[in-house]
Image (cartoon, coloured by chain):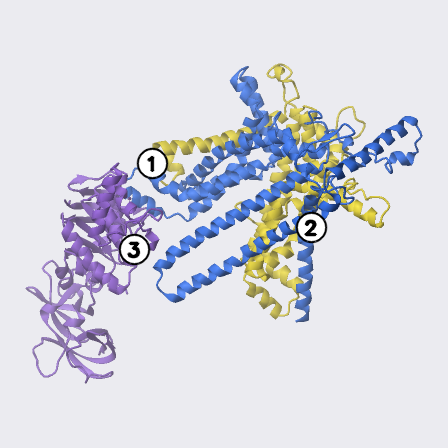
Amino acid sequence: MKSLFFTQPFFQKNGKSVALFFLVAIVFWFIFLVIIPQLYMLDLSFRANIPPLERGGPKDFYTLEHYRHFIFGSKTSADAYNFVDLGVFGRTILVSIFVTIANLAFCYPIAFYIAKIATPSTARLLIVSLIIPFWINELLRSFALRILFANEGVINNVLTGIGILDQGILFITYDVGLYTGLIYAYILLMMFPLYNAIESLDINQVEAAKDLGSSTFRTHWRVVIPHAKPGIVSGCTMVFMLTVGALATPVVLSSPNTLWFPQLIYQWFNLNDNWSRGSAYSIILLIVSVVFVLTMMRIFKVRIGEIIR
Amino acid sequence: MSAGVELKDVSVTFGSFFAAKNVNVKIEGGEFFSFLGPSGCGKTTLLRAISGFQDPSKGQVLIDNKDMLGIGPNKRPTSLIFQNLALFPLMTVAENIAFSLEVRGVSKSERMKRAGELLELIALEGQGDKKVHQLSGGQKQRVAIARALAVEPKVLLLDEPLSALDLKLRQRMRTELREIQKRVNITFIYITHDQGEALTMSDRIAVMNEGELEQIGPCDEVYNNPLTPFVATFVGENNPLFGNIIDVNNGEAKIETSDGNFISSIDKSTKLNVGDEAISFVRPESLFIIKNDNKFQNKFRAKIENIEFEGNVKNFYASLNSGSKIKFSVANAIDTSEIEINSQIELGFDINKSIILPKGALATE
Amino acid sequence: MRSSYAMNFLMGIYILVFFTYLFGPLIIMSFTAFNSAEFPAITPWECFSFRWFNEGKIAYDGQHLAGLLTDWRLHDGLISSLIIGAGVVCLSVPIGMAAAIVLTQVKSQLRDIYYSISIMPVLFPGVIIGISTVVLWDRIAGLGGGGFISDVGRNGIFLTILAQTCFISTYCFLIFVARLQRFDQTQEEAALDLGASQTQVFFKILIPYLAPAIASAAVIAFLASFENYNTTVFSILSDQTLTTVIASKVRLGISPALSALALTIIALTVIAAVTYEILRRRQERKYLESQEEFVKEKAASSRVNKDYKAGFKVPKGIVALILLVIIGSYVATQIVKNDLYGNSCIEAADTLKKSKFLDQLQTLESNQLSDEDLQGGSLGGNQDYGDIFGDPTLFQDFGGFD
């Protein structure tokens, strides 16, 4: 085993006790914390929902029932498909894509400015100012937005107070609060990959393009963006994944009629106590995440080592 | 206490590449021995084989007549001074020096005492509490040596330790290293590509090229009697005169070249027959300008192409009738002002100041 | 020339807008922490008070909204968060370190695969990691019968530590990999050559080199664990961490106590960051001084001095900003004190609200209502709590009123 995997014999290189520690730590992590729980959850998603006592008994069998439920709904419903759950799922994905693109659009100018135009001390100040809001928990940040957007919130109070409106706008009900919150939540994860990628671009290239007569738009489209591609892909991937799997912000900012997909999982788990179904929905979420990441990697030809924290 | 090192038929291969090939060397205890050769010739590989970081693919490494197979670098009686010194940046100078004692469980007071002694040896008393980055290049060198000597190894291995230093410092360190070696009486095995270094410091040198040993011997012997064209041109400078043998007789041979026929000495181990292609080598300092006397058996005409003043010598670059280029040097003390570029001169050299070798690869610049 | 002016101007406006968007909500929220009104608001401004930091409010309508210092749920959650954070650090830092060191020893063909597997946990949505851990250990607990295993397998703190370790180890792994990349391998060889055993090399050479990485990995691990929600909310079962307490409070009832909490956290992090920056500069100064003793050329040392001075501009800015904030708020406090501060103000406001409430009760009982009244105009309605009663998951972690 040793010379198959390692450049030098493992136990010899590290000393026996240290090597043992390495081995235990890594096996514990990979196998026990990462792989086995996922495999078990996958297994559970194919089982019927039965109370713990009846596990291993006759009622414990494999079934596709939960996945079927996701698409077709319960057997008693009149609808052809499970429009509620599918609707939530579809909305989650579409809105996440929208949020990702919006996030990218908002962050790009700032990232470019900090990376290329600002003086070093300004850039440092801006970067620090960017980081500070994100030291605060996502929940509290969403809470701050909720204060603003609530029906009796600050914005509505100001608008009605001044007299522009008679009645408050239902930001929360119309999901404006939620979308704003989602864009807000992961700005940092888009900003830093973008900043790092743009930073490595030689500003002379931009100036050369301008000098040759290229408009600002074209300069960015043909010179800056191709160079920043790894950063863009990294940022978009992280933001999409986190948005799709977001729980904190939707909990605070979504209205009861428009759930976010992870909230659905939460319901199956804690509300309905149906762990098998919750697992099945989790697997669906996991598949979406993985497929997205792999697709991004394939389309943009980017390697996996692009995650920065 | 010193020990001898022997390499018996040692080869080190990486895949199909021979880093070292069939090397046989016997180094005596207490010797200052150098491996000399260009980059990539395999000398670092041999050093690592002796110190234990590289197992030979074939052959044996013996230290003090004991086979070192299976014995790791931490158990061998050797100390290695790395090319980048590898001092521990997070420890003080004294801690660096005392490290080998620390890992052997020697008590702190003992260790610090020994470190103090060694600091004195390298003339850095009182600097024990400094951090490594606060030292100059030469001081770091000495700390590396002190660290290696702390546990009194039988063999000290040095991997081009002076290559990062400037000229004056290098010259001073050469002398210092030699003195330290004589004082502690340990076997020093030194590797370098600088033949000046090797020649001034060593008792014996081994010249290596592409993994193979070309010649071993005392410095003056290797310099004056090179056994291969590579050694002839790598150790010091040498002018090659290409031609064919027309006579071999009792320690001398006659070579026919397009610039004339020359007689040179020939080593008893060299096998040459009439008609073989050969090269006669003459060192720049062995070529003399012929004025009125006629004492040289070997002479030829040449045209000066370039003159170079190097301080203690003046170097002349000339071309022969055939087009071959040669270089000869004259001590600055001798007056050569009448020679200018394009001057036509006649040069001569002694039989026993030149050597004929079978044709072979020369050392490339 | 003109177009670049316009561009810069537009860019300036955009940056201003952007940062207003970033900071605005937080600043507004900070102000609401000081308004004694029950729903976080800036207008109408009831009274300036610190009540949300302290005792909260015992209501005329029977509902108690706790302030920071008196909220036992927050305290319990905080303690759990600290315990979990410590546990996660103890596990994920060694795991990350082991994984990073082994990465350097694996054959180059396998290196990519190994690295990808190590990165994987970060690509899983947090909820998945929480769920899978709970589900697995529930099974293990079930198999283990009664007793220790079953207790442990259903313990929220234990499960949360495991679940968080899963992906926080990856963060530590990345930190160690970065640090190891610049490690000089010849130091290990030198130590070996001097007689050290492999174990000694590890402890005397490698660990001291990794010490800064160990420290930053520990800090990052703790912070990541402390602020985590997605994973924790599933794995914590019947316990609570600070973040889950916050989440349930936010869903249950919006109170300015949360604004107070947020402001406290902001203040703590800003103080921590400034302290860290000051300490770092002090250490840098010490290092530069020791270098200066050694550097002989005057040109070099003057360059060093210049950088040193330039670096000082930023802390002056931050210090000035903080001073401004402190002075500003103090001045505001002084002004306000005369008008709207104090228990008297609060009592007055409360009596007013109480009487309003009693009036409402009377009106309800007398059945003289119009639809318009019920909708929320003068009666206040249920708009304060933003439709949360429509949320079926509302009373999940509730646990009752105080």
Label 2 to label 1: alpha-carbon separation: 54 Å
Q: Which residue has dot 1 on it?
A: C199
Label 1 to label 3: alpha-carbon separation: 33 Å
Q: Which residue has dot 3 on it?
A: B40
- Mark 2 neighbour class, 10 Å CA radius: few under 14, some 14 to 19, many 20 or more: few
Q: What's the residue at 66%, 67% (across, down)?
A: C4
Residue C400 point in image, percent of width and height = 70, 24
Mark toward the viewer: 2 or 1: 2
Residue B270 point in image, percent of width and height = 13, 60
For the residues bearing labels 2 and 3, Cβ distance under 8 angstroms: no
Q: In this rendering, would A225 be left or right of B127?
A: right
Label 2 to label 3: alpha-carbon separation: 62 Å
- Determine which quarter of the picture holds residue B345: bottom left
Q: Colour of chain A?
A: yellow
User: As displayed, is residue B316 above or below residue C290?
Assistant: below
Q: Do badges 2 and 1 share one subunit?
A: yes
Q: In this rendering, would B213 be left or right of C53?
A: left
Q: Colour of chain B?
A: purple
Q: Which residue has dot 2 on it?
A: C21
Mark toward the viewer: 2 or 3: 2
